[in-house]
């Protein structure tokens, strides 16, 4: 392959939206697969701050890695990564405690006004904070993937980006 074609392929890859993947550290393994599925299905780039580090290969290595960082390094690093992204996908389920994931959702939604796709369960669907931030909530993986793909095509249902609506419910009402 000539250099020009390689350059064009690289440029096309960079033109794809960049999505920050927020999740509790102990969901590292399952979220890795989800990130790969999102990237392939919706044709986006996915930034998973822990997964993208070579030295992090397991939950244990993630805990070891982060324990060697100061709180300032962890938080400012995550916020800088979110700043570079076009949207955030957060994996958050009731009963799962992850203050970091909640802070990432808040920062992306309130401060930056980025679209937030929340893969969650029924218990969190009516949370006023998540609704206020405009989280688009998805209860199953396929609906999440479809919602992200629609967003990349700018093919929403007419609701302004950032307001609560479940894309799968809107598709079924057509």
Image: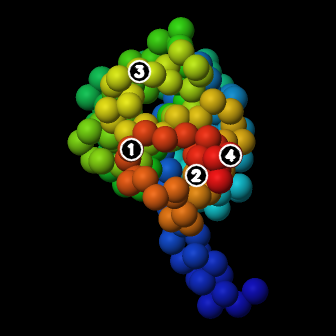
Which residue, given by chain and number where applicable, does mark 4 sit on? 172
User: Within 10 Å of the Cα at label 1, are there few (<14), some (14-19), or many (20+) other Cα atoms?
Assistant: some
> Where, by quadrant of the figure, is residue 4 drawn?
bottom right
Alpha-carbon distance for marks 2 and 1?
A: 15 Å
In the orientation shown, which residue stands out farthest toward the right?
A: 1
Q: Secondary structure at mark 1?
A: loop
Whether residue 81 can be seen here: no
Residue 6: image location, x then y, percent: 65, 82
Circle 2 packing at 10 Å, graded few (<14), some (14-19), many (20+), is many
> Of circles 4 and 2, which is in front?
4
> Distance of mark 1 from mark 3, alpha carbons?
14 Å
Which quarter of the figure has residue 74?
top left
Q: Which residue lies at the image location 58% right of the left edge and 20% below the top edge?
A: 122
The one of 40 and 136 positioned closer to us in this rendering = 136
Secondary-structure class at tag 2: helix
How far apart are labels 2 and 3 at the CA level? 21 Å
Residue bearing mark 1: 163
- Residue linked to disc 3: 127
- Mark 4 vs 2: CB contact within 8 A: no
Q: Which residue is mark 2?
A: 148
Separation of residues labelled 4 and 3 (CA atoms):
23 Å
Sequence-wise, the earlier of marks 2 and 1 is: 2
Q: Is residue 104 above or below residue 62?
A: below
Q: Is residue 114 left or right of residue 89?
A: left
Q: Secondary structure at mark 4?
A: helix
Q: Residue at x 68, y 46 (%)?
A: 172
Say if mark 2 contacts mark 1, CB within 8 Å. no
How many residues crowd mark 4 within 10 Å: few (<14), some (14–19), many (20+)? Answer: few
Q: Earlier in the sequence, mark 4 or mark 2?
A: 2
> Tag 3's secondary structure?
loop
Seen at 43% across and 53% down, the residue is 159
Mark 3: give few (<14), some (14-19) or many (20+) Cα within 10 Å. Answer: few
């Amino acid at each position: 392959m000539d250099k020009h074609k390689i350059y064009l392929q690289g440029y096309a890859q960079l033109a794809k939206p960049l999505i920050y993947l927020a999740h509790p550290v102990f969901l590292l393994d399952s979220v890795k697969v989800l990130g790969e599925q999102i990237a392939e299905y919706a044709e986006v780039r996915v930034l998973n701050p822990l997964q993208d580090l070579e030295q992090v290969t397991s939950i244990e290595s993630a805990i070891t890695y982060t324990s060697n960082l100061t709180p300032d390094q962890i938080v400012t690093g995550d916020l800088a990564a979110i700043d570079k992204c076009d949207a955030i996908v957060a994996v958050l389920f009731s009963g799962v405690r992850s203050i970091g994931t909640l802070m990432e959702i808040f920062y992306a939604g309130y401060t930056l006004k980025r679209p937030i796709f929340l893969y969650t369960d029924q218990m969190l669907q009516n949370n006023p904070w998540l609704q206020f931030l405009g989280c688009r909530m998805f209860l199953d993986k396929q609906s999440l993937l479809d919602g992200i793909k629609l967003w990349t095509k700018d093919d929403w249902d007419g609701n302004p980006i950032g307001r609560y609506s479940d894309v799968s419910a809107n598709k079924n009402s057509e």
